[in-house]
Amino acid sequence: MDRTTVSVVQFESSLGPADDGTRERMADAISAANADLVVFPELATTGYHIFDDLPDVAEPVPGPTTERLGEAAAAADTAVLFGMPVREDSQVYNSAVWLDADGAVHTRYDKRHCWGTEQASFATGDEYVVVDAPFGRVGIQICYDLNFPASSAALARAGCDILVNISAWTARLERDWQTLLPARAVEQGAYVVGCNQAGTEAGRTFCGRSAVFEPDGTRIAELGDSPGQLSVPLEPEIVAAERRRNPMREDRPATDADASEW
């Protein structure tokens, strides 16, 4: 891992199909970031409560949204990670899309752990994704994945230095959000970046509280419950020092690799 700057965009989405207004708001945030990686929340392009309209709002990848945000990424020379509903064949996925700093689509991660009513609307992903970025290895999660320790452990086994969770976490469960993010940092000896939605949508309020945690669980930056953006430098020396202090990766039994998705 090299020293890198991550910009977290606590975005208030507009509910409905991604349009030019949403894409331009996201492009503006990318341009303003001055970072190596810009992160947006789960389903940032459409809002979260779009289950009944998924056939109309889901897009292919590549598609109009990845094209416009790719232009912004290339102009800013930064990688971008954002959430959107992706249509592939007859399925729709709750996905996180990674754009490289040249604007090209690098990969996408399809959410493995779908929450409650999501299961009737989204197909479930079957692979974990770690991006080998120029500045380090980045593991990707979406929202409810955070509740399953085996998910984070799989990303750690794949060598991630930075674990990014993009979310649409509600205020009703804010305590869980604030508890699980630092816990995963300590467990996996990695930086943890939590990027959440803000605002109220379909009568439900998101808790915001996007934050960045060091590998020992120390919170080094946090937003409140309103839309906002923060940029944080991540230091490789801190990761190395914490893994020496607390060598959980080396001490984890080999049998843990077969842990079920509890």
Image (cartoon, helix red, strand yellow):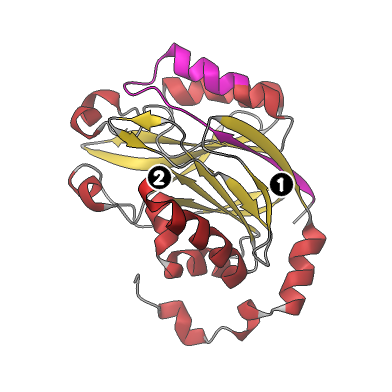
Tag 1's secondary structure? loop
User: Disc 1 residue type?
Assistant: Pro
Please state the horizontal and vertical placement of residue 213, each as a whole percent of the image: 65, 56
Residue 5 position, x and y percent, is 74, 42
Q: Tell which circle, 2 or 1, labels the residue nearer the N-terminal end.
A: 1
Where is residue 74 drawn, in percent x and y?
66, 25
Q: Quadrant of residue 100?
A: top right
Where residue 175 sits, quadrant-wise, is bottom left
Q: Can residue 91 be seen here?
A: yes
Q: Nearer the viewer, mark 2 or mark 1?
A: 2
- Identity of the residue drawn at 50% across and 61% down: 179
* Relative vertical location of residue 117 with respect to residue 154 in this rendering, above or below: above
Q: Which quadrant is home to the N terminus?
A: bottom right
The quadrant the C terminus occupies is: bottom left
The residue segment tinted magenta is 3-28
Name the image quarter holding residue 17. top left
Kindly identify the residue that appears in the image at 23 percent across and 35 percent down: 51
Q: Name the residue nearer the viewer: 173 or 146.
A: 173
Side of 126 relative to 38 (left or right): left
The answer to whether any part of residue 128 appears in the image is no
Q: CA distance from mark 2 to mark 1?
A: 35 Å
* Amino acid tagged 2: Ala
Name the side, left or right, on which 128 lies relative to 35. left
Give yes or no for residue 26 being in the magenta stretch. Answer: yes
Say whether residue 15 is magenta. Answer: yes
Task: Specify few, some or many for label 1: CA neighbours under 10 Å numbering under 14, 14-19, or 20 or more.
Answer: few
Residue 33 picture location, percent across and down: 69, 29
The residue that label 1 is drawn on is 134
Q: Is residue 103 above or below residue 98?
A: above
According to the image, label 2 marks what residue?
Answer: 171
Question: How many numbered marks have been drawn onto this rendered protein structure?
Answer: 2
**Left or right relative to 102: residue 158:** left
